Amino acid sequence: GVVGADRARFYYVDLPSWALFWKRTQYLINLYYPVWQWLAYRKMKSVHRQQLFDCVHHITFGVFRHFSLMGRLGIPFVFGPVGGGEATPGPLRKHYPLGGRFADWLRDRLNDTARVNPFLWQTYAQASLIYGKTNETVNWVPQRYRHKAHQLIEIGLDPSFVAPAPKPYDGQEPFKLLYVGRLLFLKGLPLGLDAFKALLAVKPDASLTLIGRGPERQRLEAHVQRLGIGAHVEWIDWVAHDDLAGIYRQYHAFLFPSLHDSSGNALLEAMGSGLPVVCFNLGGPGVMVTNACGRVVPVQALDGRYLDEATVTKGMAQALIELATHPDLRYQLACGAIVQAKKLNWAYPVRQVYELDLPAVLAETIS
């Protein structure tokens, strides 16, 4: 039978106001979380005595290294979707600023603690279902519990955002490329800019618009100047979300060179607007984008070895050139992007959990 998401009840727990700043700080959140999780468990234990729930689904905070105590309630327990297991391959960190290298090194070490965290192992043992946002996160689940783990994105697109048809492109007009997102070191934008420069050698009238703010803006502007492509790059600090749909539809393709995103709302919005996506085969983009709706650039050789920055940049450049010089293919992929966006609506993850996977678990429990 169908469990029915409409039967779900939501409960919210937070620490006292004086402690809330902990979760707004990058590293203090690791202190906030276990205290919050203990309070959440105590609350749900009390509520469960009165309500007698059939199952419990722990969604937040959405990071795989943060354990959950909800399995102690003694009922079927769903954990996730969680992310955070994504990591930029070592050869693709060469362009990182020093602060970015340290931040990712520290993040790697925090992830390593998951291997020896007894509370997290207990979470995996007690969970009936474990969802990772990406394949990389699923691979962090210990082998003995991997049979319970599935890849599932945690976001969806509102159907009202989907365009009726892609923007036409005849191959003669200037090719317009778009990026939307924060300007962070992990977004891989220097590699994307290098690929864009290679596109300009073939399509000299091409342009790239970057919409977003972030601490890397100054470094990226300097990189653009070094490449000599400043006349082709437009910077827009901020756009109201209500205006984004109209903006997406002015472009021909979406550049998303992120190196360890677990998903990507902008990527979904771009596909819904009929933009083929060019991204790396890493993290959320690597599972959300297919060769029917864009180009997923490989980052590994056939032997599993990670490729260097020059090689993956060349691959990204070839993908951009292919879209810019083959208008029929670009239109085909643009239509495919709309189809993929329609599939990845909010109903998709809800249906997967509550109509497909969880009923089977509950049936086994009853039998």
Image (cartoon, rainbow, N blue to C red):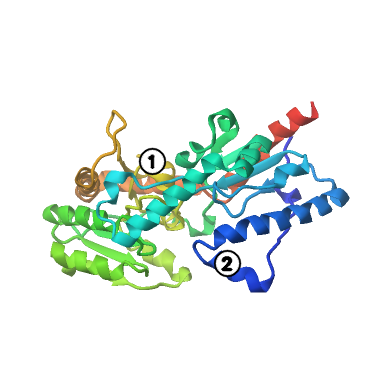
Q: Is residue 108 left or right of residue 80?
A: left
- Nearer the viewer's eye, disc 1 or disc 2? 2
For badge 2, the amino acid type reads Trp
Q: Is residue 49 left or right of residue 150?
A: right
Q: CA distance from mark 1 to mark 2?
A: 39 Å
Return the residue at label 1: 290
Quadrant, the N terminus: top right
For marks 1 and 2, the one nearer the N-term is 2
Question: Can see residue 22?
Answer: yes
* x and y percentages locating residue 90 in the rendered image: 31, 45
- Seen from the viewer's position, the closer of residues 58 and 288 is 58
For badge 1, the amino acid type reads Thr
Image quadrant in which you'd find residue 239: bottom left
- Seen from the viewer's position, the closer of residues 274 and 24 is 24
Count neighbours of disc 1 (C-alpha within 10 A) and say few if under 14, some if 14 to 19, many if 20 or more.
many
Return the residue at label 2: 22
Instruction: Identify the residue at image location x=27%, y=71%.
Output: 218
Q: Regarding mark 2 in the picture, which secondary structure is present there?
A: helix
Image quadrant in which you'd find residue 183: bottom left
Instruction: Identify the residue at image location x=34%, y=50%.
Output: 276
Residue 202 is marked as none
- Seen from the viewer's position, the closer of residues 81 and 289 is 81
Quadrant, the C terminus: top right
- Seen from the viewer's position, the closer of residues 349 and 112 is 112
* x and y percentages locating residue 264 in the rendered image: 44, 54
Image quadrant in which you'd find residue 208: bottom left
* x and y percentages locating residue 96 in the rendered image: 29, 56
Count neighbours of disc 2 (C-alpha within 10 A) and say few if under 14, some if 14 to 19, many if 20 or more.
some
Instruction: Identify the residue at image location x=44%, y=52%.
Output: 107
Q: Regarding mark 1 in the picture, which secondary structure is present there?
A: loop
